[in-house]
Image (tube, helix red, strand yellow):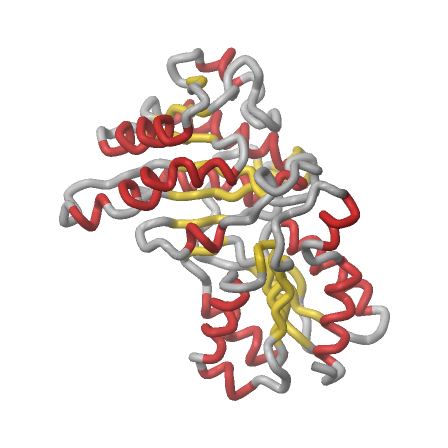
Amino acid sequence: MSTREISFAEAIREALAQAMEADERVFIMGEDIGVYGGAFGVTGDLVHRFGDDRVRDTPIAELGGAGVAVGAAVAGARPVYEFQFSDFALLASEQIVNQAAKMRYMLGGKASVPVVFRMPCGSGTGAAAQHSQSLEAMFGHVPGLKVLQPSTPEDAKGMILAAIDDPDPVLVFEHKLLYKIKGHVPEEKYLTPIGKAVVRREGSDATVVAAAIMVHKALEAAEILAKEGINIEVIDLRSIRPIDGATIIESVKKTTRLAVVYEGVKTLGIGAEISALIAESEAFDYLDAPILRMGGVESPIPYNPVLEKAAVPQVDGIVEGLRNLVKGRI
C-alpha cells in the first residue's frame, strides 16, 4: 500500500470519506459536523463533498440524535454519530446501552445495529470535569458493544473503517490530544482488526499495556528506562472490548512483570480487568512481582492545568512506577 504522513484527524476524515464513497448507506451525523467541520475539525469539508443529506447537523439533543442513528442502523443504513465530547454520550446512554447493545439479543439475532459512535475523549485541553473524562471502561462493561481506542493515525483510519463495516454497535474513543499527531497512513481503504492488540515495542523486563495517548507516554517512558538498562515491552491494546487476552498473556509469560497504564479512574478501570485476566490465566504462575496499575486519580478532572496533569498518569510517574516494578520495590 502507498502511504503518506497525515494527521490523526485527517485519517479519520479520510476513512469517513472512503466509506461514504464506497457505500451509499453510510452517512454521518452530529452537532456542528457540517459547515463548522466538527468541534475538533475532524469532519472538515465533508459536507461540501457529500451534501447535507449525508452529513447531517443535529440539534443539541444527544438522546434524540443517538436514537435516530440507532433507528437508521436497524432500518438498513450505516450511520456514524459524532458526539462533541464523549462525556455527552451519557445523555444518550439509553439508546446506546439499552437499545443498540441489546437489540440483536432481544430479537433472537434477526436484527443488527451497524451504528458507529465517535467519542472525542480525555483530558489535556483545559475543558474541565464535564468535558474531559475517559469513559471507555464504563461502556466496555456492556455486552453487545464493541469499544475501540486508536493511538496512531494509521489505526484511527483502519478502526473507523472496521467499525463502519461491523454489523454491531461500535464506540470509537478518540483522545483529543491525538488529533494533531501525524503518522504514515496508507492511501487505500483497509480495516484494522477489532479485538487485536499490537506490540509497539519489544522488551524483556516488564510488559506495559496501554491504549490511546498512554501508548505514547509508555513508549517515551520505555526509552528513558532503556538508558538505565531496563527493557520494557509496550502493548497497544487498541480494543477495550473485546480485549486481546492472548497477546497480553504471552507477553507476561516472557517478561514476568505487568503494568497497566490508563487515563480513566484507576478504580474499576481497564487495569482491573487486565489484572484479573492475568490472575485467571497460566501467566499468573510466571509473575515475579505484583501487577502494577497506573490510572487516573479518584477525582473529577480539574480545570487548573497543573492539577489536570496531576490527575492522570504522566511520563515521569510511569518511569518511576516501572523502575520500582522491575527492581522489586512494590
Residue drawn at the location 59% of the way across and 38% of the way down: 131
Q: In this view, does 189 lie to the left or right of 116?
A: right
Q: From what the image shows, is residue 213 above or below residue 81?
A: below
Where residue 163 sits in the image (x, y, percent)? 41, 41
Q: From what the image shows, is residue 203 above or below residue 38?
A: below
Where residue 170 sits in the image (x, y, percent)? 39, 43
Residue drawn at the location 62% of the way across and 86% of the way down: 288
Does residue 268 appear in the picture of this structure? Answer: yes
**Which of these two is toward me, 6 or 261?**
261
Residue drawn at the location 42% of the way across and 23% of the way down: 21
Q: Is residue 241 left or right of residue 184?
A: left
Residue drawn at the location 68% of the way across and 71% of the way down: 203
Where residue 250 sits in the image (x, y, percent)? 52, 75
Of the 4 image quadrants, the one containing the C terminus is bottom right
- Residue 114 sits in which quadrant? top left
Of the 4 image quadrants, the one containing the N terminus is top right
**Which of these two is toward me, 222 or 327?**
327
Does residue 4 appear in the picture of this structure? Answer: no
